[in-house]
Amino acid sequence: MTRIPALLLLLSAAAIVQAQATGEVRIYRCTDAAGTQTLRDTPCPKGQQQSTRDMLRPKDAPTPARAPAPASVPAPRPVPAPVVYLAPPRPMYECTTHEGKRYTSENGDGNPRWVPLWTLGYPMSGRPPHRDADRGSFRPAPPASAAAGRPQQALPTPAPPPAHRHGGLPWPAASGGGTWIRDDCAMLPPAEACARLRDRRDQVRTRFFNAMPSERDVLRVEERGINARLDNDCGGS
């Protein structure tokens, strides 16, 4: 009789090992003589009422697999910005004539020109010179006595103005009753030059409505040139 309990213990142990191997656990509910219940994972002591229940053994959550480190991707090469070629801003000059009149010019030459000295207020002796029909040059006019028939000594033809040059232009040279002059010019600041261009464009547009068809063609060309210069020199309109 003593061999049967030992055999039962061996079978219970084998069942427990098998349950552990299959991931199950057996819970024992034991009730003593006083009716107190206890739960345990081993068989109840002798003299207590026993009931069992097989349950799945809790498992830890699987460790999430680490994602492989991304392969290093070379940084994209920067795309070069498009190259825009612009012409350098063209200067604009404000010039003043000897009479005090102001005008704008694309250069600072000041409209160099040869003028007689009498136009500048210099006193002239005798009569103003007149052109020699034979030589194509100026010579002083004969005095009034010559016109009356009295012989007069021929006067030499004055030499042409000397070619004194300054900056590539004859300046100043005074000879033969004349001199080179030019207007005083000063370069305008870029902002002022752009404002003058816009003012001129407004004048062209105002004049366009009252212009003849032939003049409108000229005004269109002028406005197109002003717009192109504003885009290049002034950053647009």
Image (spheres, helix red, strand yellow):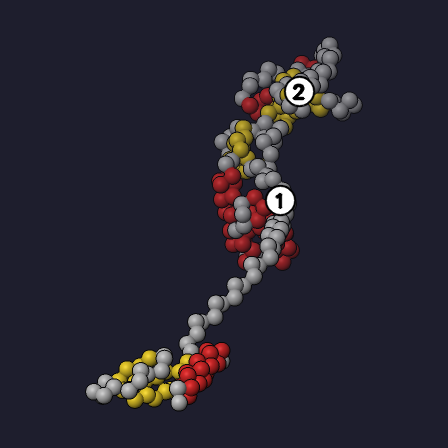
Residue shown at the point (56%, 61%) measured from the top left: 68
Position in image of residue 38 (x %, y %): 28, 82
Viewer-nearest residue: 150 or 7: 7
Q: Return the disc, 1 or 2, that comes first in the chain's sequence.
A: 1
In the rendered image, residue 114, in percent from the top left (x then y), is placed at 64, 26
Residue 213 seen by the camera: yes
Residue, far right: 134
- Alpha carbon of mark 1 to alpha carbon of mark 2: how far? 35 Å
> Disc 2 marks which residue?
165
> Which residue in the protein does label 1 denote?
86
Nearest the camera: 54 or 121? 54
In percent of the image, x 31 and y 85: which residue is there?
46
Does residue 16 appear in this view?
A: no
Indicate whether 183 appears above or below 235.
above
Of the residues shown, which amino acid type is indicated by label 2? Arg
From the viewer's perspective, tell me whether residue 23 is left or right of residue 143.
left
